[in-house]
Image: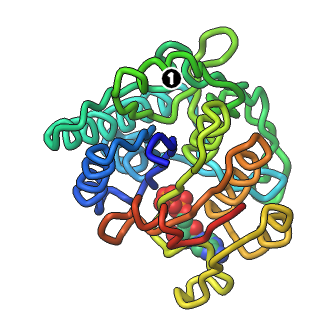
């Protein structure tokens, strides 16, 4: 099916494979495939925050997730870091004849999110509540705007910022942002590219790749994932529940990473 829509999320550490990824996207566009790209920004944010003298602070929530504390200054740094990645991607794609359009989830309310008003964290063994935090959970998208861009033969490139009900900018997890985009656009495939071959049964043993997870069994496979890989598996579950046909967690470090994932290389869920 040539008109199939795919949403591709590139991992924060995927910068290494930017050129091969853009070559692959250019080839897919020549084959008339429709794509939306979503990128992360955590590594670049960490670097820039250090350089600007406001290093990121990480906390562990009571449910065990580690996340960045996004105070207002950190949000500004996150905006700068993701804008730079976004522009770089658009430049690389334009240089290959792909008419890419860079947006953040703020623009045109593309990604609407709910602000996490208070985060319960454990610090030095004690519970604490953080309120000055600008992180959100993506909930809905402006599908009309993205569909219009796709119909104009453009390739939207989205930075993981969301907009709250009252118009505040929020830092989003890129994998969950991509999941909401895929769900809202009813994409056939969501591809989450990362720096491992997929979900590994015995991380970091690269030969223990899990090739396929049936939709009904995601919960039992989530136990193998730790840290940020767990967010990918949870994002996959959300997308499938919302009607996306399949999710592939694939390796960004190989040649033609999107095409390889489309061919089923990686962990195919669904
Ligand atoms: P990206 O920035 O590319 O999106 P993340 O760093 O968010 O990637 O998530 C991928 C990381 O998840 C891997 O590099 C690895 O360190 C970690 N991980 C934890 N558990 C697993 C697992 N079972 N299989 C593969 N990776 C895992």
Is residue 43 rendered to the left or right of residue 96? right
Q: Residues within 10 Å of mark 1 (few under 14, many from 20)?
A: some
Secondary structure under tag 1 reads helix
Which quarter of the rendered image does ligand 1 occupy?
A: bottom right
Count of numbered labels shown in the rendering: 1
Residue at the spot x=73%, y=71% of the render?
213
Q: Is ligand 1 less than 8 Å from the beta carbon at label 1?
A: no
Residue at the spot x=36%, y=33% of the render?
155
Is residue 54 rendered to the left or right of residue 209? left
Residue 97 at x, y = what percent? 17, 38
- Looking at the rendering, in which quadrant would you find the C terminus? bottom right
Residue 82 at x, y = what percent? 39, 36
From the image, tell me which residue sits under label 1: 147
Residue 221 at x, y = what percent? 78, 72
Q: Nearer the viewer, residue 37 or 43?
A: 37
Q: Is residue 80 above or below residue 231?
A: above
Q: Nearer the viewer, residue 24 or 234?
A: 24
Q: Farthest front residue?
A: 1
Indicate the colouring scheme.
rainbow
Residue 74 at x, y = what percent? 49, 34
- The picture quadrant where one finds residue 63 is bottom right
Residue at the spot x=80%, y=37% of the render?
129
Is residue 165 rendered to the left or right of residue 21? right
Q: Is residue 253 above or below residue 235?
A: below
Q: Is residue 198 above or below residue 100?
A: below
């Amino acid at each position: 099916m040539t008109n199939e829509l795919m949403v591709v999320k590139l991992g924060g550490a995927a910068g290494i494979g930017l050129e091969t990824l853009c070559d692959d996207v250019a080839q897919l566009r020549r084959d008339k495939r429709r794509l939306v790209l979503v990128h992360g920004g955590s590594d670049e944010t960490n670097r820039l925050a250090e350089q600007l003298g406001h290093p990121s602070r990480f906390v562990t929530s009571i449910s065990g997730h580690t996340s960045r504390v996004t105070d207002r200054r950190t949000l500004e740094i996150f905006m700068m870091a993701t804008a730079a990645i976004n522009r770089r991607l658009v430049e690389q794609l334009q240089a290959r004849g792909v008419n890419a359009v860079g947006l953040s989830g703020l623009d045109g309310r593309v990604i609407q999110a709910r602000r996490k008003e208070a985060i319960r964290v454990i610090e030095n063994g004690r519970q604490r509540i953080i309120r000055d935090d600008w992180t959100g959970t993506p909930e809905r998208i402006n599908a009309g705007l993205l569909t219009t861009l796709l119909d104009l033969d453009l390739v939207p490139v989205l930075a993981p910022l969301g907009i709250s009900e009252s118009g505040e900018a929020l830092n989003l997890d890129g994998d969950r942002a991509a999941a909401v985009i895929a769900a809202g656009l009813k994409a056939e495939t969501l591809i989450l590219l990362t720096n491992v071959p997929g979900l590994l049964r015995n991380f970091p043993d690269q030969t223990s790749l899990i090739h396929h997870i049936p939709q009904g069994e995601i919960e039992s496979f989530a136990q193998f994932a730790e840290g940020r890989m767990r967010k990918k598996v949870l994002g996959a579950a959300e997308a499938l529940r919302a009607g996306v046909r399949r999710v592939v967690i694939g390796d960004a470090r190989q040649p033609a990473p999107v095409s390889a994932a489309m061919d089923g290389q990686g962990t195919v869920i669904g």
